[in-house]
Image (tube, rainbow, N blue to C red):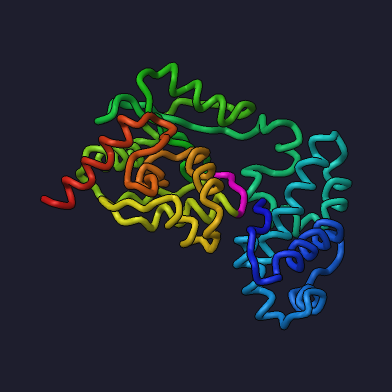
Amino acid sequence: MPDPVQDDDGTVPIIAEICEHIRANLDASLTLAALGRRAGMSAAHFQRVFKRIVGVSPRQFTDACRLDRLKAGLKEGGTVTTAMMEAGYGSSSRLYERAGDQLGMTPGEYQKGGPAVVVRFAIATCELGRVILAATDRGVCAISLGDSDDDLTAFLRDEFPSAELRRDDPGLRDWLDDLLRHLAGGQPHLELPLDVRATAFQRQVWEELRRIPYGQTRTYKQVAEAVGRPTAVRAVARACATNPTSVVVPCHRVVGSDGKLTGYRWGLDRKRQLLEREQKQQES
């Protein structure tokens, strides 16, 4: 969950107080109008200022706070109902509607460590070594590049320590073929459904990365500016570093302010090859 950025127009302390008010009153009805009055602004102006400073809307911030409190309550061993009420969801239908997507499972499954979640995966040889594609019933949840199948399955186990992993090359063949064509430079536009768990800020950054055109790059600062957080360059870099879906969320297209390649979860050599192949395809 993002914290307010530094600013010099006097609004940061006001928004910081509003953030603390939201955290302390998750079980209350926090309307945009009421929050705006507390900040001494109209609802529309407050919405714009809050999103500029925090990086997400007041509702997204409130949802993230509720989710954090829910996860903490579930991990402490309380009942789902108790954790739900303490997190301010109010009703089970509201809980399952809003929390399910971000948890990637039901609250009960999360409390048990996710044993009921099934993650299918397929492994193949690609232009950059070996690649693993993993998916839930909702969509692709992980893609990793590596040198060996053992490395790739270890990555998957680290990402989903309590899930049931099932190899399913035939069932994932269509998505895997699209991925392999893309890695070979034969399919510039890769559109695969995603099912990734993320904070509101991570999701914002990853969506922005998917907007970077094939064969082009952006700096971390440019991405930070694009998501409305111009000073959050390090936070953008962290979001890139924790991206679980190589290539589909093209964090390899983000470079340093001087245009040089910087850290890449799957190795700088692979980052260089990906960018060179994309640029060559664009030139041909």
Total number of numbered labels? 0
Q: Nearer the viewer, residue 234 or 197?
A: 234
| Residue 272: % across, % down | 28, 36
Res 181 quadrant in image: top left
Whole-percent x, y for residue 68 in the image: 74, 47
Which residue is located at x 20 percent, y 44 percent? 186
Q: Main secondary structure of the magenta part?
A: loop
**Residue 231 part of the magenta-drawn span:** no
State which quadrant residue 98 falls in: bottom right
- Asked if the stretch drawn in magenta spans residue 198, the answer is yes
Asked if residue 95 lies left or right of residue 104, the reply is right
Res 248 seen here: no
Q: Position of residue 277 (x, y in %)?
A: 21, 41
**In the image shown, does 214 or 27 lie closer to the viewer?**
214
Does 206 sit above or below residue 140?
below
Boundaries of the magenta span: 196-200
At 50% across and 44% down in the image, what residue appears?
Answer: 237
Q: Nearer the viewer, residue 210 or 35?
A: 35
Q: Residue at x 11, y 50 (%)?
A: 284
Residue 113, position as x, y percentages in the image: 70, 31
**Going 79% across and 41% down the picture, which residue do you hit?**
72
